[in-house]
Image (cartoon, helix red, strand yellow):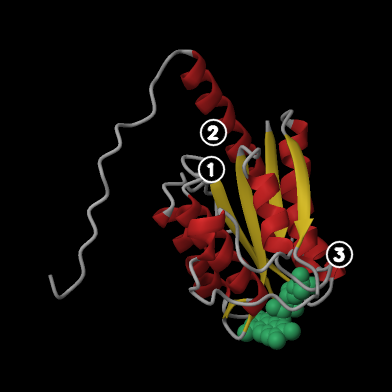
Amino acid sequence: MKVLLVNGSPHPHGCTYTALEEVAKALNTEGIDTQIFQIGTEPISGCIACKTCAKKGRCNFDDCVNDFMDLAQGADGFIFGSPVHYAASSGAITSFMDRAFYSDSNAGRKSFYLKPAAAVVSARRAGTTSAFDQINKYFTIAEMPVISSQYWNIVHGTVPEDVKKDLEGLQTMRVLGRNMAWFLKCKEAGIKAGIPFPLKEPKVRTNFIQ
Ligand SMILES: Cc1cc2nc3c(=O)[nH]c(=O)nc-3n(C[C@H](O)[C@H](O)[C@H](O)COP(=O)(O)O)c2cc1C
């Protein structure tokens, strides 16, 4: 089994990465493979609502979002990490997640369906819980079981050396990794035991006019 960890920071080995690495180590100790996916520093467009994804099965912008989606189909779990930028998740990870989740849903691929997920955020000082809430909303519209830890998944720092001193933050990351590993093993055991996936209803879509 494999968990994909997305680093939504422009720093490939910064604070968010340091937190993700701690989660990955705990997953590896439990026998789960991991891959850290860097969204990098190239500009990432937001979704332009062109709906090309519904026709082509991929986002119209052929960048790191499509690279990630190719890997996502084979992944068993996800961690999305972001630095806090102005009390929110970074603009880049927001654009990335908008397009990843929207294109996957429009393409009918179900790359995220019933796969466990967690958000991890890093900040110097403030805005962590609002960024954490923001990322969790992608999971709960995509039928993803959200894995939690013993505190909200937060580390503090301006540079990785600060994060390494945030002992509570690092422990939160290790507990998160072990909790995700436990869930993945339970899911695998359940599937092997013949527990079927939940019944799906045809989707009802209403708005406030109808
Ligand atoms: C544009 C920008 C906005 C930021 N806004 C905040 C903020 O609102 N609150 C905060 O505590 N830190 C803020 N920071 C600091 C980063 O969140 C923090 O240093 C983080 O741990 C960096 O993680 P990284 O090394 O993975 O990029 C901001 C940094 C940048 C570049």
Determine the residue located farthest toward the left in the rendered image.
Answer: 210
Residue type for callout 1: Pro
Label 3 crowd bin: few (<14), some (14–19), many (20+), radius 10 Å: some
- Can you tell me which quadrant of the image ligand 1 is in? bottom right
Q: Is mark 2 on a helix, strand or loop?
A: helix
The disc label shown at residue 72, or none: none
Quadrant holding the N terminus = top right
Instruction: Judge by depth and name the residue closer to the eye, 158 or 142.
Output: 142
Q: Mark 1 points at which residue?
A: 116
Relative horizontal placement of residue 105, taking residue 43 as reference (left or right): left
Determine the residue located farthest toward the top in the rendered image.
Answer: 193
Relative horizontal placement of residue 103, taking residue 143 as reference (left or right): right
N-terminal of the two: label 3 or label 2? 3
The disc label shown at residue 13, or none: 3
Quadrant holding the C terminus = bottom left
Give residue 80's position: percent from left, percent from top: 63, 58
Q: Are marks 3 and 2 in contact (CB under 8 Å)?
A: no
Q: Are marks 2 and 1 in contact (CB under 8 Å)?
A: yes
Residue type for callout 2: Phe
Vertical order, 210 against 191 (above or below) = below
Q: Quadrant of residue 188?
A: top right
Q: What element carries label 1?
A: loop
Q: Mark 2 points at which residue?
A: 183
- Tell whether circle 3 marks a residue whose Cβ is less than 8 angstroms from ligand 1: no
Residue type for callout 3: His
